Amino acid sequence: SVMPALLSAISTGARNGVLMKGGMYLEQLSKANAIAFDKTGTITKGQPEVTDSILTDKRASDEIFAAVAAVEHQSNHPLAKAIFKFCQKETEKQLPEVLTIEDVTGYGVQAEIASDKWLLGSIAFMKRSNIVGYPSDWKAWERNRQEEGKTIVYAAVNDEVVGAFAIKDQIRKDAKETLRELQKAGVKTIMITGDHEATAASIAKEAGVDDWISESLPEQKVEEVVRLKKKYGSVIMVGDGVNDAPALAKADIGIAMGSGTDVAIDTADLVLMKSELDKIRLSLRLSKRMNRIVK
Ligand code: ADP
Ligand code: MG
């Protein structure tokens, strides 16, 4: 009958670090035709590290590092800590006072230091903020790092780009195998990220997803889930960030990483307590077995 099969599946899940918020989701899981993954913190470990930087000589490097460190010290973005750590090591200067700071969701942060306006964020953020000055000889530096799957964050002061930081985040060790197994089970795998196309393509190929969507703003992640539902039918979304929560809610089943933000965990139907992606396969197996018994 239904109840014992359901309870047994839920408790097996719990013993394996899969928290299920109801039996309904368990039943739905094995019906999914596609599964969408966020990149940072989901396919990757979410432990970004700055590998290197490039600066113009418009400002003293000491001053750039100190200002960027001061701004990122105030930001909660996953990339902020890595940039702060790197910049703090590169400067002997005391960090300047940040007068105002403002998050521009999906793009970056904007801050005032003395009479300067600083912007930190993606190239899309720079373009949208009408940054005029941009070093033309950085192309090879950027391209090489993006091909290694690195995220580039730009720093601009008063409408001029003065620095860029390359940030590496490793792919989770169970990502490749999980993706391969999902594909073998006939489930389409898609990665959705706000990152630049070249960086996204590199990570997508390394992890082995079927398809990927890059440069997706937080609200566009929801639209992508809607589109995937139309295309494939039942869709699972896996994510960790504040930005992923609406997409987790919109998917037929939302799965949050245990290492994720509270809002992602609260919104999701299933939580991978230890952030192990291979537990998705276990959950699908439990679902299949339960549906077989119930029928
Ligand atoms: P994703 O969807 O890839 O998880 P987000 O939507 O959180 O990423 O952020 C998109 C981009 O905005 C980042 O890749 C980064 O370039 C930029 N960004 C946002 N906040 C910051 C910050 N505090 N410092 C540097 N860059 C930032
Ligand atoms: Mg994320």
Image (cartoon, grey):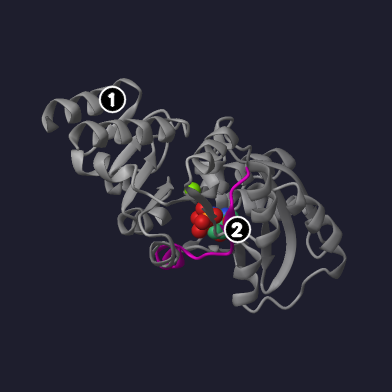
User: How far, Cα to Cα, is label 2 from label 1?
Assistant: 33 Å
Mark 2 falls on what kind of element?
loop
Q: From which residue to which does the magenta span run? A: 208-223
Badge 2 crowding class, 10 Å Cα cut-off, few under 14, some 14 to 19, many 20 or more, is many
User: Are there few (<14), some (14-19), or many (20+) residues within 10 Å of tag 1?
Assistant: some
**Residue 195 bears which disc, if any?**
2
From the image, which quarter does the C terminus lie in?
Answer: top left
Residue 78 visible in the shown view: yes
Could you say where residue 51 lies in the image, as x and y percent from the top left? 74, 41
Q: Which residue extends farthest front? A: 295
- In x, y percent, where is residue 25? 25, 43
Q: At 75% across and 46% down in the image, what residue appears? A: 148
Lateral position of residue 137 relative to residue 207, left or right? right
Q: Which residue is mark 1?
A: 14
The image quadrant where one finds the N terminus is top left
Q: Which label is found at residue 263?
A: none
Q: Position of residue 29 (x, y in %)?
A: 32, 43
Q: Amino acid at mark 1?
A: Ala
Looking at the image, which is closer to me, 89 or 11?
A: 11
The residue sitting at 70% across, 38% down in the picture is: 89
Queried on whether the Cβ of the residue with tag 2 lies below 8 angstroms from ligand 1, the answer reads yes
Task: Say which of 223 and 285 sits in front.
Answer: 285
- The quarter of the displayed image where residue 91 is located: top right
Whichever of callouts 2 and 1 sits on the residue coming sooner in the sequence is 1
Asked if 60 appears above or below 178 in the picture, the reply is: below
Residue 22 in sight from this viewpoint: no
Amino acid carrying mark 2 in the image: Asp
Residue 219 lies within the magenta run:
yes
Q: Position of residue 103 (x, y in %)?
A: 47, 62
